[in-house]
């Protein structure tokens, strides 16, 4: 699996992945997370320009997954309710992981890549996104509390710290 920064010419394929992900979430009891065309093409295009959007290419060079990775403070993570973050050290955030559904293990590859770049990762997901919650717990993320995103909706906040003795493989 090769992970690289997204290019503008990848945008149509990326948007198709988000369409697939929305259908997948609806079919698995999560019809409330990515609604009303979220994420928009404009948002993803801006993330590409900011070098925050990444794609996963399989061995044949086909795009099979995408995610947003940002190192630094996420404004929606400044306040956490019903809990606390594991630490206050510099961190990276993963948002909007998605695949085209043609290959298993894409999310795991995204997480491995992220931990190769930063050992302090925060991520959030919708209460109805049981698939993502299970994935995060499987990979050792701790549920830390509740955050509210810019539109005011609640998300469950997760955090994982990897040190030299338990580095992701």
Image: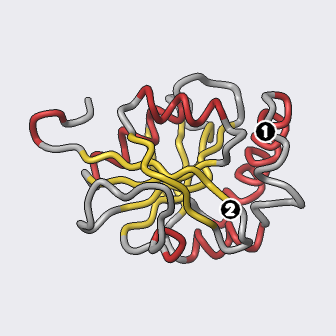
Foreground of the two, 78 or 99: 78
Residue 24: name its quadrant. Answer: top right
Residue at the extreme right = 36
Residue depicted at x 33% and y 45%:
160
The residue labelled by disc 2 is 9
How far apart marks 1 and 2 lie (CA) works out to 30 Å
Q: Residue furthest front?
A: 82
Q: Residue at x 62, y 37 (%)?
A: 64
**Residue 140 placement (x, y as % from top left):** 35, 33
User: Horizontal placement of 61 versus 71: left or right?
Assistant: right
Q: Residue at x 51, y 30 (%)?
A: 135
Q: Secondary structure at mark 1?
A: loop
Q: Measuring from the top left, give residue 49's x and y in whole percent.
A: 57, 76
Q: Quadrant of the N terminus?
A: top left
Q: Which residue is mark 1?
A: 30
For label 2, the SS is helix
Is 29 rendered above or below residue 78?
above
Q: Residues within 10 Å of mark 1 (few under 14, many from 20)?
A: some
| Residue 51 x, y percent position in the rendering | 49, 70
Give me the disc on residue 56.
none
Give the vertical position of 107 relative to 19 (above or below): above
């Amino acid at each position: 699996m090769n992970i690289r920064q997204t290019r503008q010419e990848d945008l149509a394929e990326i948007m198709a992945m988000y369409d697939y992900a929305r259908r997948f979430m609806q079919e698995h009891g999560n019809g409330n997370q990515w609604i009303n065309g979220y994420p928009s093409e404009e948002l993803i295009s801006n993330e590409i320009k900011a070098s925050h959007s990444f794609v996963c290419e399989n061995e044949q060079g086909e795009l099979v997954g995408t995610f947003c990775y940002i190192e630094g403070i996420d404004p929606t993570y400044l306040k956490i309710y019903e809990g606390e973050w594991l630490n206050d050290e510099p961190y990276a955030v993963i948002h909007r992981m998605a695949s085209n559904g043609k290959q298993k293990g894409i999310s795991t590859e995204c997480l491995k890549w992220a931990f190769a770049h930063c050992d302090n990762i925060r991520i959030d997901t919708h209460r109805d996104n049981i698939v993502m919650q299970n994935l995060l717990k499987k990979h050792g993320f701790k549920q830390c509390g509740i955050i509210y995103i810019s539109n005011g909706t609640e998300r469950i906040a997760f955090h994982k710290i990897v040190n030299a003795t338990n580095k992701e493989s």
